[in-house]
Amino acid sequence: MSSDISVTISDHVASVEIHRPPNNFFDFDLIREIANTYEELDDDVNCRAIVLCSEGKHFCAGANFQSRESWGNDQLDNQASQLYVEAVRIFSGRKPVVAAVHGAAIGGGLGLALSADFRVTCEQARFSANFARLGFHQGFGLSVTLPRLVGRTQASLLLFTGRRIKGDEAVSMGLADELVAQTQVRERATALAREIAGSAPLAVQSIRATLRNGLAEEIARITDHELAEQSKLRTSDDFREGIAAMAERRPPDFKGR
């Protein structure tokens, strides 16, 4: 286990915690580590449900675009392609996952949160598919998972505007499932996972496999498309402006080119 991920198991619930505070940015290595951990837990009879949580201020602020400014497009495409292969492995896990979203879930971090079966959150959390505000296309399977949860119209609104919504609004639209005090997010997520773990584990896995039938395959197909669109937009002036505006904490001035 790397220093970026820790796992503890108690009462048949595995707590998988990300340790990249404060923003918990993800990259290929982190997503692969989560996928590897899920596979190991799939084979562990002591684990019946998983809580995905994070150390620090945010749940996951997505990818750190500024750290990749010196990379070429081919290198970026290759890294993203490998990352999405690992994302499909996350969606292929057999055991139920409850995400404890205590802070921001932004961009691909939102995609990671939506890979879980349930999300427990709080008023202070922020959810945003901010890709259009960066001049970019959504990824991590959000083209599938977001409309599944909130419907096509709401998904389009979130993707077109990149707006940030609070935890209570996320619950009201179906993006998250329970709203509690920020200090109770992980505790409540663990309690929910423990309740699930109290059911017959083989039955739960069977039911879950039926409900998620074909989802991993759909994620594999859509991430291929998302990557192709990202590759095209990455060369645009608007993408460069979006990244610059984010770094400079100012509104972007997009030109449509």
Image (cartoon, helix red, strand yellow):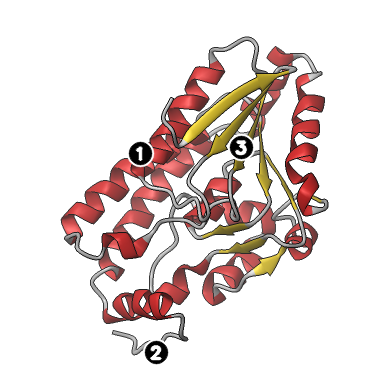
Q: Is residue 86 above or below residue 113?
A: above
Q: Amino acid at mark 1?
A: Asp
First-in-chain label (2 vs 1): 1
CA separation, marks 1 and 3?
17 Å
CA separation, marks 2 and 1?
33 Å
Q: Is residue 184 above or below residue 110?
A: above
Front one among 235 and 1: 1
How far across and how far down the image is residue 150, in percent? 68, 58
Q: Residue at x 46, y 68 (%)?
A: 131
The reply to whether residue 29 is visible in this rendering is yes
Q: Nearer the viewer, mark 2 or mark 1?
A: 1
Tell me the element at label 3: strand
Q: Amino acid at mark 2?
A: Asp
CA separation, marks 2 and 3?
37 Å
In the picture of the structure, the residue carrying the numbered disc 1 is 29
First-in-chain label (2 vs 3): 3
In the picture of the structure, the residue carrying the numbered disc 2 is 253
How far across and how far down the image is residue 13, in percent? 69, 23
Tell me the element at label 2: loop
In the picture of the structure, the residue carrying the numbered disc 3 is 52
Q: Amino acid at mark 3?
A: Leu
Q: Residue at x 78, y 38 (%)?
A: 187
First-in-chain label (1 vs 3): 1
Front one among 48 and 6: 6
How dense is the environment of label 3, judged by Cα within 10 Å: few (below 14), some, or many (20 and up)? many
Q: Is residue 238 above or below residue 177?
A: below
Q: Residue at x 34, y 86 (%)?
A: 256
- Residues at discs 1 and 3 in contact (Cβ within 8 Å): no
How dense is the environment of label 2, judged by Cα within 10 Å: few (below 14), some, or many (20 and up)? few
Image-quadrant location for residue 233: bottom left
